[in-house]
Image: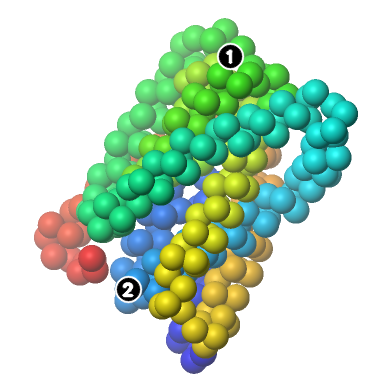
Amino acid sequence: MDIVLAMKALIMGLVEGFTEFLPISSTGHLILAGSLLDFTGEKVKVFEIAIQAGAMLAVIWEYRVRIGAVLGGLGSEPKARRIALNVVVGFMPAAVLGLLFNKQITAVLFKPVPVALAFIVGGLVILWVERRARNNPVAVRVQSVDDMTLLDAVKVGCAQAFALIPGTSRSGATIIGGMMFGLSRKASTEFSFFLAIPTLLGATFYSLYKQRDLLTMADVPMFGVGTVSAFISAFLCVRWLLRYISTHDFTIFAWYRIVFGIVVIATAHFGLVNWAE
């Protein structure tokens, strides 16, 4: 692997890690970053999905004690079984729809301008939900992931399915969706982290298996660099986000999405940036 390819893989890994758990769309940022770096193609699409495993491992490490307690209590603790069942149920809508429509979504929507439009729409939704939360704070009925019902998990899982649209943001869909359905900001964020484990792991293995003919042993260093950098940056981001949500809302991310989306569309329209498709 030459130094230029290594640097591109490193940058893409950092982009993945710093954006995966923020409501700003890691997939959208990867598509745009890949376009700017001239790092595109079918193999790169597999790379972008595979390095999500690094971000997922960061969540496992951050919540290793909690996850261990849940797994250890599956045979004897109703609370542990309920949390595990909620994660499985919440994972299913996106998994089923992803299997059914992955090819169509990849062919039509994995392009800079559709991603930019999704950025703007998602930002407007976040602004609406945050305004709703400020005007009606008593609407919060679930303070902790431990208190979620199976129906709560189904609702959040359906919200996560919207993240199949590149630029929507998986974490944004689950966090904001959870808040719309009565979860506290902390409960929505933590459940989003837990949902990331089967979602990102499933997407990684499915993509690697489906596109295995594209890959060779020579690609291992590139994937390794991207995965490690995604792990480190995601770990830092998760730690920061947990502190941030204790005293802040997501309005700043909404405005970031809107401004960033407008910039991408404007630069594409006026030919200032040749966004690759």
Identify the residue at image location x=47%, y=69%: 47
Point out residue 264 in the picture as x, y percentages from the top left corner.
25, 55
118 up-or-down from 90: above or below? below
Label 2: which secondary element: loop
Please name the amino acid that badge 2 sits on: Gly
Identify the residue at image location x=44%, y=65%: 210
Label 1: which secondary element: loop
246 up-or-down from 205: above or below? above
Residue annotated with mark 2: 41
In the image, 191: left or right of 162? Answer: right
Please name the amino acid that badge 1 sits on: Val
Residue 230 visible to an observer of this rendering: yes
Q: Upstream in the sequence, badge 1 or badge 2?
A: 2
Q: Are marks 1 and 2 in contact (CB under 8 Å)?
A: no
Q: Residues within 10 Å of mark 1 (few under 14, many from 20)?
A: some
Which residue is nearer to you in this view: 241 or 158? 158
Q: CA distance from mark 1 to mark 2?
A: 44 Å
Count of residue discs: 2
150 up-or-down from 189: above or below? above
Q: Quadrant of residue 191?
A: top right
Identify the residue at image location x=45%, y=86%: 4
Q: Residue furthest left?
A: 270
Q: Indicate the quadrant containing the C terminus: top left, top right, bottom left or bottom right.
A: bottom left
Residue annotated with mark 1: 140
